Image (cartoon, rainbow, N blue to C red):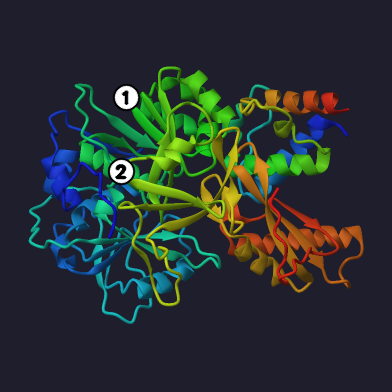
Amino acid sequence: MRPAQGSHNKSTSLFEALSAVDKHSDPLIVDANASITLSNLVSGSALFGRGDELCGRSVLVATTNQFTTASALIELDGVARRIVLCPPDLPIEHLPYVMDTAAVDGIVSDRTALQYGSPRPLYFSPCSPTVEPAKCERNACYKTEWILLTSGTTGIPKLVVHSLASLAGAIGPPNMSPEPIVWSTFYDIRRYGGLQIFIRAIFAGASLVLSNAQESPAAFLTRAARLGVTHISGTPSQWRRALMSPAACFISPKYIRLSGEIVDQPILNSLHSAYPHAQISHAFASTEAGVAFEVNDGFAGIPPETIMCTPFVEMKVKDNSLRIRSARTASRYLGNNVSALLDEEGFVDTGDLLELREGRYHFIGRRDGVINVGGLKVHPEEIEAVINRHPAVQGSIVRTKKNPMTGAMVIADVVLDRVNACLDEDVRELREDILLRCRESLSSYKVPAAINFISSLSIAESGKVLRRNA
Amino acid sequence: MDIRSEIVHQFSQVAREQGRRLSPLSDDLELLESGLDSLSMAILVVRLEESLGIDPFTLTDDARFPITFGEFVDFYETSSRQSQ
């Protein structure tokens, strides 16, 4: 049996939640190029009033910007059988796998029709960049499955199954204060962290200020300040960058939320000195485990009582790894030959390793060696596979290196074939060549920042390369 | 090694690799306006550790990243003097 909800929201769809909230202050969803009131969002359509034609389908939402995604999600939740949310950097070569695994038979996109090579008959629904007044039929009442994508070891994404109830499970009671909430986030709403903020804003009837990919921190912060942002979330890396901008002092949030990476004391201190009146909290959440807890005492690390007694979330530390059971976790992975998401007792093993130090738990890294670059997961194996394809390479190991900007960076130690391990000049050329291959086939945050040539890799007794993370 | 000229060299090297247009590097240039994004700046710190042998960020608990190019150079120069 799944644990109790704890959620204060009983809406069966985003549309229903949005229809129910008090919109007298005319809250907005806004990005750098467009804005719409929540009232217009309820009465209009970005799908040319034809959202009902996607009724009961498994719909891939692949739009070029967050704003369009936001309006499509409101229209589709409760209407589609399944929503498959495409993150902004999904490599196109993985689309056929995603579509096949999620049995996609409908696509919402603002791109012109793409060739997706799907064997199923597809219904393609164009998505307009603006929401136009339209009479929408909403006869369907599906408990839509939400499929979020997260990175897998080999680069092929994992498809994680959520429901609106699990996604909204951590949302507290509605805001009773007379002052309206204005949410903002550095995250993209097409990933779990940003989606949380989007759903919070919809359930609260609050305005939401979205960032744009090409926007400078100064431009985003200036815009957020003008719209009176009160609540704002991001990773420590995003905050470190924001604090470098003179525009950081324009905003005066009441609530700052950090998540997605290990939070250290210096970033908490810097935020406290920049925003002395804000409540600064760091939270643990992941696509698989959902929102687990937040720490509000201004210190890095987690008090043991947070692990022991956070309401509605059971946590335990087993083999140093944090395990979580709650109604907010995902239910399973989609696909054949995928690992079980929940253990036999219904816990998600996060793989995040904890160490008890001076009375508090601290995250010390991941069991599977996953590197967190500014909140984005990097599987060493995926990068090693690219490097090892180089004809001059005998083997490689990818490891993490602490970084003041992104928390961590990717470094590769490479063993060359004996024939190639010769002149300095050749080595320089080889380094360039290996990096070029990485750049060609990996997202930029996965490309090693440095390549070191070493004479041999340490092999463990198991026969596997020994991973040791700095 | 002259720290300033190595930093200038690495700025343009990383900008070239990342396909970014670098602004003229004057001391009062804000790093956020330099043309480098977070990832480029993260790479820059790794490359400077390789070439200069120091990572001043590991030597301090101060999380504040320098704001201007001049501060950045000064941060490395000061750290280099201290580690000698």
Instruction: Identify the residue at horizontal 56%, vertical 40% (top origin).
Output: A362
x, y percent for residue B19 = 61, 49
Residue ID at (52%, 22%): A246
- Asked whether, in this view, residue A74 is left or right of residue A347, the answer is left
Q: Amino acid at mark 2?
A: Ala
Q: From the viewer's perspective, tell me whether residue A325 is left or right of residue A323.
A: left
**Which labelled disc corresponds to residue A228?**
1
Q: Position of residue A238 (x, y in %)?
A: 50, 37
Residue A277 is left or right of residue A81, and the answer is: right
Does A285 sit left or right of A432 as displayed? left
Name the residue that disc number 2 marks.
A170
Q: Chain of mark 2?
A: A
In percent of width and height, residue A422 lies at 91, 65
User: Considering the image in quadrants, where does the N terminus of chain A appear?
Assistant: bottom left
Element under label 1?
A: loop
- Residue extending furthest toward the bottom: A119
Quadrant of the rendered image containing residue A433? bottom right
Q: Can you tell which mark lies on residue A272? A: none
Tag 1 or tag 2, which sits nearer the N-term? Answer: 2
Amino acid type at mark 1: Gly
Asked whether residue A186 appears in the rendered view, the answer is no
Q: Secondary structure at mark 2?
A: loop
Q: How far is mark 2 from mark 1, CA to CA? A: 24 Å
Vertical order, A414 against B21 (above or below) = below
Residue B15: image x %, image y %? 66, 44
